[in-house]
Image (cartoon, rainbow, N blue to C red):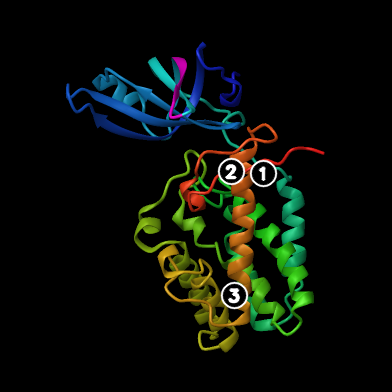
Amino acid sequence: MIFLNTLKEGESYQEIYLVKSVTKGTTAQTNKTFLSMVLQDKSGTMNAKKWDVTSEDLETFKAGNFVKISFEVRSYKEKPELHIKFGDKVELTKYDDYIPTSPIAKETLEKKLEAHLNNIKDKDIKAVVDELYNTHKEKILTYPAASNNHHAFASGLLYHTVSMLDVASFLIKHYSDVDSDIVLASVFLHDLGKIKELSGLLPIEYTSEGHLLGHLVIATNLINNVATKHHLEDNEKIIHIEHCVLSSHGKYEYGSPVLGATKEAIMANFIDDLDAKMMMYDNNTKELNPGEFTNRLMTLDMRRLYKKKEK
């Protein structure tokens, strides 16, 4: 397997990759059709283009298809881009080379998650948390946390959640007047809606429900449904957890319908933002040499990240 992160500019190759996404365009002057794609293997993703598109190409290069392609690596806007000469759809039964995975084993993360959840003492909160975890356990343990920007890999949701719970457990001790049960439950549940917002791993796409509602609303609905089942829909602590989930993006323009109005909500938002940005830093600087900057990143307020020199 020739992984995407080992390709060299100017070289030609033949290999099988997963089509993560694809859009069709036309040239302004000649009105010819071309395809812009993102291809994926377990090492990451890379942009690709196919020119002189045929009707067969439109069937071959669809999101979720595995394609065997012949291509040349070129540079576009200072980044490598694959220029595909031809390709065929292939059927695979083993996907290990195509799904990026968590840097920590799923089994280790699962044990840590359950240990954190066992620290929740309030019986009503515990009842809601336990039912949601047991009902959706398989997806909670395997789903990504995003399609692109952060934790976009197998068990990414689990990795992100456990990392946040680790930070929350530390902050709860420092800010001792916060309700630890609300914080722990809110951190665990804040991204639960992604099990319905996202389609899974091959490829990671947004569902219709995800587009129409978003994961904050989906998560709140899941919480409220279970709370109602236990006659807890008017329980103030459950309402506070729903508030933490809905305000977890921190700003209206980032998708939160409300802003954090409690210490627990403010804490959950900042933990989420910190953990996401730390992963985004790692993702964008891992290929840099010490002393180099990234290009300006739209997802990080157009800043250029710097990889510090080693001592």
At label 3, counting other C-alpha atoms closer than 10 Å, the crowd grade (few under 14, some 14-19, many 20 or more) is some
Q: Quadrant of residue 309?
A: top right
Q: Secondary structure at mark 3?
A: helix
Expressed as whole percent of the image width and height from the top left, the position of residue 120 reads 72, 75
* Main SS, magenta residues: strand
Residue matched to label 2: 153
Asked whether the beta carbons under mark 2 and mark 1 sit within 8 Å of each other, the answer is: yes
**Sequence order check, earlier mark of 2 and 1:** 1
**Sequence order check, earlier mark of 1 and 3:** 1
Q: Is the residue 3 above or below the residue 184 in the image?
A: above
Residue matched to label 3: 266
Horizontal placement of 91 versus 232: left or right?
left
Of residues 307 and 50, the one drawn nearer to the viewer in this rendering: 307
Is the C terminus in the top left, top right, bottom left or bottom right quadrant? top right
Residue matched to label 1: 102
Q: Which marked residue is nearer to the observer: mark 1 or mark 3?
A: 3
Residue type for callout 2: Phe
| Image point (44%, 68%), residue name | 217
Q: Secondary structure at mark 2?
A: loop
At label 1, counting other C-alpha atoms closer than 10 Å, the crowd grade (few under 14, some 14-19, many 20 or more) is many
Horizontal placement of 9 versus 279: left or right?
left
At label 2, counting other C-alpha atoms closer than 10 Å, the crowd grade (few under 14, some 14-19, many 20 or more) is many
Looking at the rendering, the stretch of residues picked out in magenta corresponds to: 71-77
Looking at the image, can residue 153 be seen?
Answer: yes
Expressed as whole percent of the image width and height from the top left, the position of residue 102 reads 67, 44
Q: CA distance from mark 2 to mark 3?
A: 27 Å
Is the N terminus in the top left, top right, bottom left or bottom right quadrant? top right
Residue type for callout 1: Ser
